[in-house]
Image (tube, helix red, strand yellow):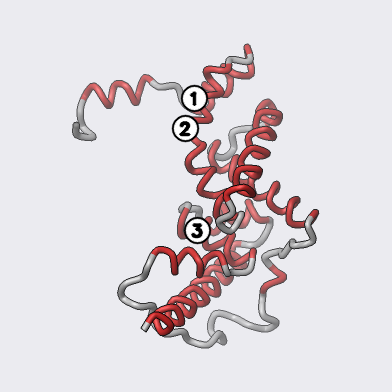
């Protein structure tokens, strides 16, 4: 079935949006509406939680569950100034920070900046190998410091802009840009090392 199939287009247009589902849930505690919101956003939230938890499914499950609990509690105060998915992501990031702070593992974005380092003063890294194994890429991302990893995942995986990332993480967009540059450099270096070790 093509994307331009008229019945598919009609069905998509007739489905309620996130705001309508949220309002239905809030008005009458309509579980069907909340389940529809959940089904729509759970896959993306799970991917984000898994990245924040460095691949630990147990931690990701707890993080996703806590995010949904807080979203249900705070839905009435959500002002719809951003997309619902962006709001969920911000809740997940806050839950992850609280968990890391509680466990003594918190690393803020600014904490991983090299003193005085700029994009121009960072050493050049070789190009990554032409073929990258998915497991090597996942390990390279998981090994990044928390701040680098958060920015890389939000920008390169989830598609957020630097302005959105700045709002989500409480940093300036320029900090997000420099963190992304450093994160990509570290990932490239790790992939080159992984290729060398595989030979």
Residue 131 falls left or right of residue 40 = left
Labels 2 and 1 touching (C-beta < 8 A): yes
Which is in the foreground here, disc 3 or disc 1? 1
Mark 2 and mark 1: Cα distance apart in space: 6 Å
Circle 1 residue? 36
- Residue 116: percent from the left, percent from the top? 67, 83
- Residue 11: percent from the left, percent from the top? 32, 22
Residue at (67%, 80%) from the top-left corner? Answer: 114
Circle 3 residue? 155
Badge 1: how crowded within 10 Å, few (<14), some, or many (20+)? some
Badge 2: how crowded within 10 Å, few (<14), some, or many (20+)? few
Q: What is the secondary structure assignment of the residue under circle 2?
A: helix
Circle 2 residue? 40
Residue 195 falls left or right of residue 47 = left
Mark 3 and mark 1: Cα distance apart in space: 26 Å
- Residue 119: percent from the left, percent from the top? 55, 80
Examine the rendering and report whether any part of residue 91 can be seen. Answer: no
Residue at (53%, 56%) from the top-left corner? Answer: 154
Name the quadrant containing residue 51.
bottom right
Of residues 111 and 117, the one nearer the viewer is 111
Quadrant assignment for the N terminus: top left
């Amino acid at each position: 079935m093509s994307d331009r199939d008229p019945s598919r287009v009609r069905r998509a247009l007739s489905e309620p949006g996130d705001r309508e589902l949220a309002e239905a849930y809030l008005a009458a505690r309509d579980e069907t509406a909340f389940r529809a919101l959940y089904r729509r956003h759970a896959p993306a939230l799970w991917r984000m939680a898994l990245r924040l938890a460095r691949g630990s499914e147990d931690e990701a499950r707890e993080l996703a569950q806590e995010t949904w609990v807080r979203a249900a509690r705070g839905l009435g105060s959500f002002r719809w100034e951003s997309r619902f998915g962006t709001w969920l992501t911000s809740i997940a990031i806050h839950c992850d920070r609280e968990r890391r702070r509680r466990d003594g593992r918190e690393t803020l974005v600014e904490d991983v900046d090299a003193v005085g380092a700029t994009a121009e003063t960072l050493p050049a890294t070789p190009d990554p190998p032409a073929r990258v194994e998915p497991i090597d890429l996942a390990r390279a991302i998981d090994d990044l410091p928390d701040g680098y990893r958060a920015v890389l995942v939000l920008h390169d995986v989830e598609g957020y802009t630097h302005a959105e990332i700045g709002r989500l993480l409480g940093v300036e967009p320029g900090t997000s840009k420099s963190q992304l540059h450093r994160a990509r450099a570290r990932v490239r270096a790790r992939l080159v090392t992984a290729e060398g070790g595989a030979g």
